[in-house]
Image: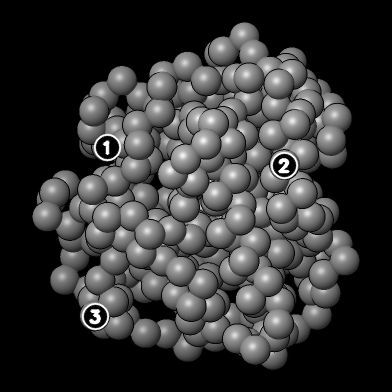
Amino acid sequence: MSDALLTPSRQVMVREDWLDLTREEILDPALPIIDPHHHLWDHPGERYFLDDLLRDAGSGHAIQTTIFVQCGAMYRAEGPEDERSLGETEFVTGAAAQSATGKYGPTRACAGIIGMVDLTLGDRVAPLLAAHRAIAGRRFRGVRNRTAWHPSPEVRSNLVTPPPGPLEHPGFAEGARELARQGLTLDVWAYHTQLPLVLALARAVPELTIILDHVGGPLGTGPFRGRREEVFPVWRQSIQALAALPNLAVKLGGLAMQVNGFDFHLADRPPGSEALAAAWKPYIETCIEAFGPTRCMFESNFPVDKGMCSYPVLWNAFKRLAAGASTAEKAALFSGTAARIYGLSSFSTSPAR
């Protein structure tokens, strides 16, 4: 991995001029899509605001709505530590309101917001959740904590390295139960080595809807580089165990992060959708076979995945991967599952263009 192509947070650097080298005709351009996983932020060397998102969302696919997911953006500089993440919810609520005016295109960005409340606080999370909901209203749909962790310093996908044990913390399950009591969801970003911990949490809090991000994080960097054939069956076994629990769903994407080790960014030209689909097929097909289309949703994970591929090419790859699905299955994979899981059923999934 060339460090020259990585940002301070160990994400692959976005190079618009490089991405422009590969352009494709949009496949099935009228298919309605909810993008259930993206970020907005202004980190050192990495800036992605509403106008950047809408430029990508408006590049050809019928992106109806989007869901923002916690990423440590715009925290308050002052006040109690546990309340500083309210700044992120304020920031994203403003972007959502701007998009909702309709003056910036047909996509309704950040129709759902997944914020940050430290679940290790246990039953003390209730007033914090209430504070986020007071800011974002019905847009606030759930929480994600920083949980992706591995002891190797080469395995990193967060701007700030999280502590090693949030999922194992005694208070985490109690905090998760409060989410369920309030009708909110929990997104979990965990590497494949942590999936047994996700399984234990899902069993401990069966009333909570848990969304596994990025196909469960099969690692391909650090100590796992060059060991894809060894990692895959271990990852697959965990995915099948997780799928046996009805309170779990999975996001299909996030495989263009440097931790996955595909290294498309090292080529002279960015990959086309056929190359992406071929590389990701074993992971996407395993998840769909295990969970079924009604518990799977394609995601962009932008701008993180933008270091390796453009938004039009990414969604073309997903459409290639879903080519054999029925009309109803495609509707679930591209919009229906996300709308149901995140309570966005009031938003239209008719073609936006």
Q: Residue furthest front?
A: 79
Tag in front: 1 or 3: 3
For disc 1, the marked residue is 221
Q: What residue is rendered at 81% in x and 31% in y?
A: 180
CA separation, marks 1 and 3? 26 Å
Q: Position of residue 17 (x, y in %)?
A: 24, 80
Say which label, 2 or 3, has the lower sequence index: 3
* Image height of 237 relative to 9, above or below: above
Instruction: Look at discs 2 and 1 and give the one toward the viewer.
Output: 2
Q: Amino acid at mark 2?
A: Ala
Q: What secondary structure is found at the residue carrying circle 2?
A: helix
**Residue farthest top in this picture:** 170
265 to 257, vertically: above or below: below
Residue situated in front as seen by the camera: 199 or 325: 199
User: Judging from the image, what secondary structure is the residue with disc 3 in?
Assistant: helix
The amino acid beneath tag 3 is Asp
Residue drawn at the location 74% of the way across and 18% of the way down: 123
What is the number of callouts on the image? 3
Query: Which of pointers 2 and 1 lies earlier in the amino acid sequence?
Result: 2
Is residue 156 toward the left or the right of residue 115 in the image?
Answer: left
For mark 2, what is the residue? 131
Badge 1 marks a residue whose secondary structure is loop
Q: How is the image coloured?
A: one colour
| Front residue of this view, candidates 292 and 171 | 171
Does the residue at mark 2 contact the one at mark 1 (Cβ under 8 Å)? no
Point 32% across, 69% down: residue: 271
**Res. 13 visible in picture:** yes
In front of the other: 84 or 110: 84
Is residue 187 at all visible to an observer of this figure?
Answer: no
